[in-house]
Amino acid sequence: MDFPSSEGKIGSAFNDGKPCAFRMPAGTFGRVTHPHPDIGFTGPHRLSRLLVPCRIKRAMTSRANAQNQVRKRPATIVDVAQAAGVAIGTVSRHLNGQPVRASNRDQIERAIAALGYRRNSTAVAMKTNTSRIVGFSVPALGEFHAAMLEQLSRQMRLSGRAVLSFCHNTQPATIREGLEFFAAHRVDAPVMDGEESIRREVLRHIDEGLVVVLYDNDIPGLPVDRVFVDNRKASARRQPSARAGA
């Protein structure tokens, strides 16, 4: 590829639409060659080391664009309905756990399997105001909270939910940040230890419809669900077994 260039100006080879960084004397021509023997070009020009990387990057970009164009489009609920030979509303009812005819259900399930259909969880969350995610705000994942996370995750999995944890290191500002994060991501409920300094923020989110579950420490007077351990009774139950073991 021959190209002209003028003194003090960038040459006309382009890298993703931008000029490559090289200069040539006025009125001269340069030929793009590759100095590597495996490429098959001979007689490397002194500009080759500048020009060839631009050509290689341009070729890589073209391949990446071609791959993006041929990438398979995700199947939609419309595709499932067409493949199953049923109405879109029938597919929607089945996906939302509502009763449909057994024959339709089987056709929908076969279409879902054949198309590899996955529900758009973001769209579902916007429509139903549920994300199937429970937030778990913890100071750190030590022994106590790690065991609690394991049990919570196990129970939530039974209802088709997952748990998203957020470590706040007992910093009130970080606890507020975690609460805002959970609210912005439309979690079904954040499970968190009570912190009096964030009472106002918790109450605001409750007023906006967020369900909050407190554990370990309370924020008295708030309309929330609570899961607490009676340490005195737990200790009393523990002492006889400890003596028996001794």
Image: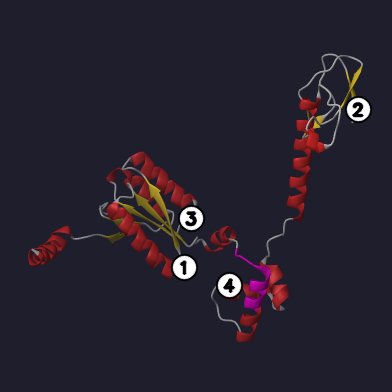
Quarter containing the N terminus? top right
Figure quadrant of residue 216? bottom left
Q: Which residue is mark 4?
A: 95
- Compared with 222, 33 (above or below) is above
Q: Earlier in the sequence, mark 1 or mark 4?
A: 4
Nearer to us of marks 3 and 1 is: 1
Nearer to us of marks 3 and 4 is: 4
> CA–CA distance between discs 1 and 2?
63 Å
Q: Earlier in the sequence, mark 4 or mark 2?
A: 2
Q: Which mark is residue 160?
A: 1
Q: Secondary structure at mark 3?
A: loop
In the picture, measured across the screen, residue 133 lies left or right of residue 34, that is left
Q: Residue furthest front?
A: 37
Q: Secondary structure at mark 4?
A: helix
Q: Which residue is mark 3?
A: 186
In the picture, measured across the screen, residue 164 lies left or right of residue 66, that is left
How many callouts does the rendering have? Answer: 4
Residues drawn in magenta: 108-119
| Amino acid type of the residue that numbered disc 3 sits on in the rendered structure | Arg
